Amino acid sequence: MTAEPRWRLGRVRRATRNLLLPLDVRGHPLLIKYTRNRDEGRQEIRGHARLLGHYRVPALHAHLRVPGGYLLAYERLPVSHNRGLLLDLLNTETPTADLLEYMDELTTAYRDVILETARQTKPAAILRKLYWDRAAPGGRLDTYYAGTDFPVADGIIDVPVSRLAEYVLVVNGRQFHFDWTATLRWLRDHFRHDEPVWAALTQGDPTDVNLAHPLAWLDYDTAGLNSIPGEFANFLWYVCALGGWLVPTYNPAAFADHPATFTHVRANRPRPGRAYMNLGTRTIRIDYTAPLSPPRRAAAAAYWQHLVQPVADKLWPDEDLAGLLRPYLAMRILAVYNLADLPPTDRLLLLARLAETMSPSFNPLTFFSIEEARCPAR
């Protein structure tokens, strides 16, 4: 009889800058994570500890500092080919009962913890990676855009983005005044201020690949005290744009184990219509449609109705949610991918969405297709 091996190694996978190795030790499934950035490794260890007792997270069995980073040994959850993530519940033709049940569980857990831990906090005490650090001098806004100019859409609208303020911008029949330079300046100023913001204990980067099914939270280098509007903007933009369109297009390796994602990109990719410029009237017209698959619309609607709105009713009963979300959403549009590096059509679409975000008439319900979704009453 052949003895059962004590060790069984899986295939190494890449997750952004990290490496993941499935490992079975005497029948116990582990996931070994090698994080190359020591600061992020230390933050991940701290973030995991902060979430314990508040959210379901896989056990962290051990961590070890090694040359160039950290090794972390986690309990391995049953995530496999097209299974085990919120992403997989979204990769269907219609919303399933499993998705609706999952969103109910997710929003209940978040609502309870956010309202229990919410407090007004100075930005210096908040996790700053996704917003404040990217808007700070030397952050992504500077790295991507400082001292650079580029066309709105090469060969389509050849006006430099720096001159958009000289034109009337008409997007899907709605008229906007959009100033690229002023937008960057406003974002830098907004995230330089020291006024307290409402923050709570969250995972910080709630993407459809960082949320496991059955419900658990993964990836902790942004876990801790996070801006609540930033948490909301992050989830909604990921569900409505990043997860179904941009990340599969520009970082397909992230979905290597969940290839069903790629069959649904068409259902989530915005479709450009007419785009042209009238020099006589100094007008730029951009038409597009922004389809969103029914499961993603249902997820956005459930998140808004069962988490965003109830929390806002408690914390901001007299404030405009659009204004609270605007700076965070604009940062997610600008500081994940460098718009200058994208193909002209996708750049055009994202600039149109940014102009809508920065408009005084910005409405999150229509922007995130929430009014189109049916969400069961609770």
Image (tube, grey):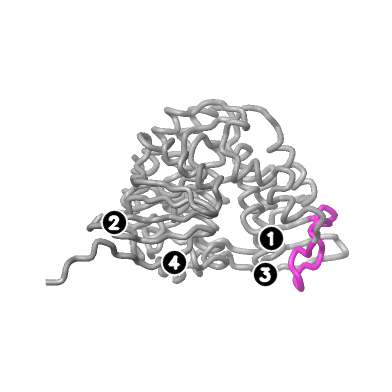
Bounds of the magenta span? 150-168
Secondary structure under tag 1 reads helix
- Between 34 and 256, the one lying in front of the other is 34
Give the distance between the C-alpha atoms of the residues marked 2 and 3, in whole angstroms.
42 Å
Q: Which of marks 2 and 3 is in front?
A: 2
Say above or below: 113 vs 44.
above
Which label is found at residue 377? none
Q: Mark 1 points at which residue?
A: 339
Label 4, residues with CA under 10 Å away: few <14, some 14-19, many ≥20:
many
Dot 1 amino acid type: Leu
Q: Which residue lies furthest to the front in this view?
A: 67
Q: Position of residue 164 (x, y in %)?
A: 80, 56
Q: Name the residue rendered at 44%, 45% in the picture.
A: 303
Label 3, residues with CA under 10 Å away: few <14, some 14-19, many ≥20:
few
Dot 4 amino acid type: Thr
Q: Which residue lies furthest to the right in this view?
A: 280
Earlier in the chain: of badge 4 and badge 1, it is 4
Dot 2 amino acid type: Pro
Q: Is residue 163 left or right of residue 27?
A: right
Q: Mark 2 points at which residue?
A: 29
Q: Mark 3 points at which residue?
A: 343
Q: Where is residue 95 in the image (x, y as percent from the top left)?
A: 36, 57
Give the distance between the C-alpha atoms of the residues marked 4 and 2, in whole angstroms.
26 Å
Q: Name the residue under label 4.
A: 261
